């Protein structure tokens, strides 16, 4: 680690000393007659590519200007262009100018503008944040281009109060991602995970982003189902100019690349992210009812076993480097008085992962005595992931006041996993255990939307409408798992396969799971502006509605091999000692001395569920002097239904509720650069399908079963926010804020008592509260120094301190009824240091983030809380534009290779102490070295 930092420091120093000394031109552009500053005026140095737009104060600053005399050109629509000649620039000094533009009173005639409003610049983002009625953070496409981030997840690391987990999921203010909602443009995005509400931000390429905004407080015009934050992703529809880009990347992961990689046979379409049917049950395989009905001696049980693919042979290969590539293009067509534009991206990739994970279970804690291990396992984990992604956005400009957008995002992902487990179960398998799991999972995700924007009366009246559709398909065909134990014999001992007396999810099981989920949404938003006392602060009335419907169909089936008790004991002893690729061969299924098949499928292994949310809102903005008052009321009516069954009978859920969601926000502007915000909003948090479905899924990885709870109810949250914001210069911010949230019936992931096995489910607590403080600073050193190297640095830092407490009720026995809220981190820190030299076209970025310990699974009197411990992460990126067409990029992901750590609170004291509490799960994924290039064909 020390050597890496020394090399990085030397690299930065070399760049800095190699730079030529330059100067700065800064100043203010104003109206010559009124003296009012002009926002958005274009200021450029003639004969160069250097230039900027004035910020919200009319100020501008052009850095890294060569010493000497230059001609400065200043222009703005409806003003006369001004040329300032022989502007003297001195090295390491700033030349200050006061620029006054005269209004152009000449005849302009009719002008038709077909260009889009700029929304992705730093100035536009700062303006949008300042004008926002909520507590909000954001990042622009201009900042994204400088960072050279590859996807939206990497971009999100730069946003205040946001933490990225698994390089793709988002937490806001340290709250579990189930409390966030994601919108792509103006439509709610689908969940990309089967078992929880979350979104994989790595699906969206960064070059397709216009801007990203994270709203941390509520207002009536946005969906009310969140408590952490509303993440709004705006994608690009129309390119500035036609282009065609091509890119490729390669990655080398420590401990994986060029090392042994193990897996069973896959299908010929695995490289495209889906199985072609190779792993499916044969079409002639008997149904569940038929296998249940036939007797134990029926030949059908042997015939069914012979139909199954004997896919237990483990193949060892070398893991190749991660590879990815893609191309994108943008095109504009003029169609008479209209204009059609597209921004389309295609990508394809493959990655490998191999590591060793430690997994433990323990007996009950006795004060003053060391806790004895129940199990001790070491997993050799191997995975190969393939993905294909397409994003295609289209925009039709009917005229300057009317546009229609058609946006599409498609992703296909497949992952092939192998886990080879060794260790001991100190009760049942004290001499040794060896377990196997072979799993393949594929996901198909599509989200599309058609959106229209229409303006009247010089943009004083606006109607926005959107129609969206989502689909997610999930397949988990032929998840094979079995266990064995070490048996000492007369001669050399050997591992013996465990044959269960009844169906078991752990022993000789084959699981097949299939899910389809689709959704439709339609919304309309109306906005009317009225003239106010302040010219740039109109009074606004807003109203609209949203209808959102989702439906899921899920069915699973699992079967188990068994050896009938009536058959020869010698035959059984021979079978359970055979190598795994031979033990389950077709010839070993027969009625005399072979395996038979029994059905393990339960009534809970299928469910149909749906959620409908109908919402309507009214709101207003009313500026009074330096105050800006806004608020309104949103009403959401929801219907959540589920149909499933248990052995005891049907399970039906029909939750209907109308919830009023008020919101009030007040801003006070101390000056054009400083303001304070205060707000209140009421929101909700609805259970997801998987959380209230009674289906039980056994996780081989966590040695536990996961099941839903049909009794779950909607949580309600009261949110209070207060924040001071200061904008010293363009693209720079400083903010200090606090927040308080009160939860009624919060939903938590909890442990349950089921014999001696761990089982995780969900439960409503009585109530909870969360409060905290957060600080953010973005600073460019060019505003405080002209020293070479230093002036090209910028710092982005944000941190949050958070306290939480949940109340479990007065009827809780043998444990504390108050503790931290499950999933809530007590602190979050994100920092980044960026270097960008425009003249040399080189950028370097170092980013660090960490979140405090959070309860992964809330325990009970028999099973302690399981905590996910802090993990320090540093990512480095270096990019260089070697020509106008070619950009090279290198990076290191997870430089520290910090361990993933999950500990149980053994002594139930509400904190983790490493010399007292015990590790449950631990592993390291390895550093990743990446290199890529992008070539602009046109």
Image (spheres, helix red, strand yellow):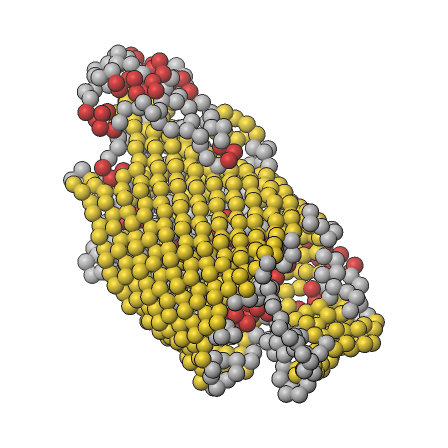
Query: Can you tell which quarter of the image residue 187 is in?
Result: bottom left
Q: Is residue 937 above or below residue 230?
A: above
Say if residue 256 shows up in the picture.
yes
Q: Quadrant of residue 147?
A: bottom right
At horizontal 63% and vertical 65% (from top left) the residue drawn is 794
In this view of the protein, which residue sits in the foreground, 542 or 150?
542
Residue 127 picture quarter: bottom right
Q: Position of residue 713 (x, y in %)?
A: 25, 56
Question: Residue at 66% of width from left, 83% of height from top?
Answer: 31
Picture layout, residue 401 above or below residue 15: below
Please tell me which residue lies in front, 481 or 415.
Answer: 415
Residue 804 in sight from this viewpoint:
no
Residue at the farthest left position: 648
How far from the left and from the top, in percent, is residue 395? 53, 56
Q: Is residue 399 left or right of residue 883?
A: left
Residue 427 vs 639, above or below: the answer is above
Identify whether 180 is placed above or below 689. below
Tell me where residue 420 appears, x and y as whole percent: 43, 31
Residue at position x 77%, y 65% in the image: 48
Q: Is residue 96 left or right of residue 2?
A: right
Looking at this view, is 883 or 748 the one in front?
883
At 47% from the left and 26% from the top, the residue drawn is 265
């Amino acid at each position: 680690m020390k050597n890496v930092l020394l090399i990085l420091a030397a690299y930065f120093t070399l760049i800095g000393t190699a730079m030529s000394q330059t100067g700065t031109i800064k100043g203010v552009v104003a109206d010559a007659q009124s003296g009012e500053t002009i926002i958005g005026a274009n200021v450029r140095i003639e004969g160069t590519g250097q230039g900027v737009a004035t910020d919200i104060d009319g100020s501008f600053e052009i850095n890294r200007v060569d010493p000497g005399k230059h001609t400065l050109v200043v222009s703005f629509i409806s003003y006369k262009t001004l040329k300032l000649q022989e502007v003297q620039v001195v090295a390491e000094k700033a030349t200050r100018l006061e620029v006054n533009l005269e209004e152009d009173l000449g005849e302009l005639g009719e002008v038709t503008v077909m260009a889009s409003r700029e929304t992705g610049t730093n100035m536009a983002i700062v303006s949008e944040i300042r004008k926002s009625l909520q507590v909000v953070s954001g990042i622009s496409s201009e900042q994204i281009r400088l960072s050279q981030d590859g996807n939206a997840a990497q971009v999100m690391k730069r946003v205040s109060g946001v933490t990225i987990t698994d390089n793709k999921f988002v937490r806001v203010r340290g709250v579990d991602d189930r409390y966030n909602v994601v919108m792509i443009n103006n439509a709610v995005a689908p969940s990309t995970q089967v078992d929880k509400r979350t979104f994989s931000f790595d699906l969206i390429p960064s070059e397709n982003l216009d801007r990203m905004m994270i709203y941390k407080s509520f207002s009536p015009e946005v969906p009310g189902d969140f408590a952490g934050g509303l993440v709004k992703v705006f994608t690009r529809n129309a390119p500035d100019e036609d282009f065609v880009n091509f890119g490729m990347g390669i990655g080398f992961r420590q401990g994986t690349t060029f090392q042994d990689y193990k897996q069973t046979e896959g299908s010929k379409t695995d490289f495209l992210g889906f199985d072609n049917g190779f792993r499916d049950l044969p079409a002639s395989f008997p149904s569940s009812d038929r296998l249940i009905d036939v007797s134990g001696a029926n030949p059908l049980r042997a015939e069914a076993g012979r139909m199954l693919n004997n896919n237990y042979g483990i193949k060892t290969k070398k893991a190749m480097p991660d590879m990815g590539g893609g191309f994108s293009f943008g095109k504009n067509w003029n169609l008479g008085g209209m204009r059609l534009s597209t921004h389309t991206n295609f990508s394809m990739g493959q990655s490998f992962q191999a590591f060793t994970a430690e997994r433990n279970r323990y007996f009950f804690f006795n004060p003053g005595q060391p806790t004895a291990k129940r199990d001790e396992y070491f997993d050799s984990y191997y995975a190969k992931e393939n993905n294909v992604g397409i994003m295609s956005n289209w925009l039709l400009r009917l005229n300057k006041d009317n546009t229609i957008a058609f946006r599409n995002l498609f992703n296909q992902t497949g992952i092939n996993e192998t886990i080879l487990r060794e260790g001991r179960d100190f009760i049942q398998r004290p001499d040794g255990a060896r377990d196997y799991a072979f799993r393949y999972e594929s996901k198909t995700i599509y989200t599309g939307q058609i959106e229209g924007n229409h303006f009247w009366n010089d943009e004083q009246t606006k109607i926005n409408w959107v129609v969206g559709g989502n689909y997610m398909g999930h397949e988990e065909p032929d998840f094979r798992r079995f266990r064995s134990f070490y048996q000492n014999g007369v001669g050399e001992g050997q591992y013996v396969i465990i044959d269960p007396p009844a169906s078991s999810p752990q022993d000789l099981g084959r699981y097949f799971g299939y899910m389809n989920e689709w959704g439709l949404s339609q919304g309309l938003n109306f906005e009317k502006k009225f003239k106010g006392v302040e010219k740039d602060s109109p009074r606004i009335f807003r109203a609209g509605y949203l209808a959102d419907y989702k439906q899921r169909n899920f069915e699973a089936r699992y079967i188990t091999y068994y050896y009938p008790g009536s058959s020869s004991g010698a035959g059984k002893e021979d079978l359970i000692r055979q190598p795994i690729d031979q033990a389950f061969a077709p010839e070993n299924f027969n009625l005399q001395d072979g395996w038979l098949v029994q059905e393990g499928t339960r009534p809970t292994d299928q469910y149909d569920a749906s959620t409908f949310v109908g919402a309507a809102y009214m709101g207003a903005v009313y500026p009074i002097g330096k105050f800006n008052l806004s608020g309104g009321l949103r009403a959401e009516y929801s219907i959540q239904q589920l149909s499933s069954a248990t052995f005891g009978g049907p399970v039906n859920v029909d939750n209907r509720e109308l919830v009023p969601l008020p919101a009030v926000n007040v801003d006070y502007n101390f000056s054009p650069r400083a303001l304070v915000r205060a707000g209140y909003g009421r929101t909700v948090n609805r259970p997801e399908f998987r959380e209230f479905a009674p289906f039980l899924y056994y996780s081989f990885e966590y040695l536990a079963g996961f099941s839903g709870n049909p009794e779950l109810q909607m949580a309600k949250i009261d949110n209070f926010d207060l924040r001071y914001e200061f904008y010293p210069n363009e693209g720079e911010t400083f903010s200090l804020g606090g927040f308080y949230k009160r939860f009624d019936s919060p939903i938590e992931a909890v442990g349950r008592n089921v014999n001696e096995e761990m089982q995780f489910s969900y439960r409503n607590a009585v109530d909870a509260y969360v409060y905290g403080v957060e600080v953010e600073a973005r600073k460019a050193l060019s505003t405080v120094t002209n020293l070479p190297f230093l002036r090209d640095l910028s710092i982005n830092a944000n941190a949050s301190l958070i306290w939480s407490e949940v109340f479990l009720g007065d009827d809780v026995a043998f444990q504390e009824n108050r503790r931290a809220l499950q999933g809530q981190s007590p602190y979050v820190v994100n920092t980044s240091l960026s270097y960008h030299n425009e003249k040399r076209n080189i950028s370097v970025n170092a980013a660090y983030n960490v979140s405090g310990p959070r309860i992964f699974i809330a325990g009970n009197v028999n099973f302690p809380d399981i905590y996910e411990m802090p993990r320090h992460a540093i990512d480095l990126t270096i990019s260089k534009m070697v020509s106008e067409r070619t950009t090279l990029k290198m990076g290191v992901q997870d430089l520290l290779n910090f361990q993933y750590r999950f500990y149980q609170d053994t002594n139930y004291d509400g904190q983790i102490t490493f010399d007292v509490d015990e590790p449950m799960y631990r592993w390291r994924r390895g550093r990743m070295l990446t290199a890529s290039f992008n070539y602009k064909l046109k």
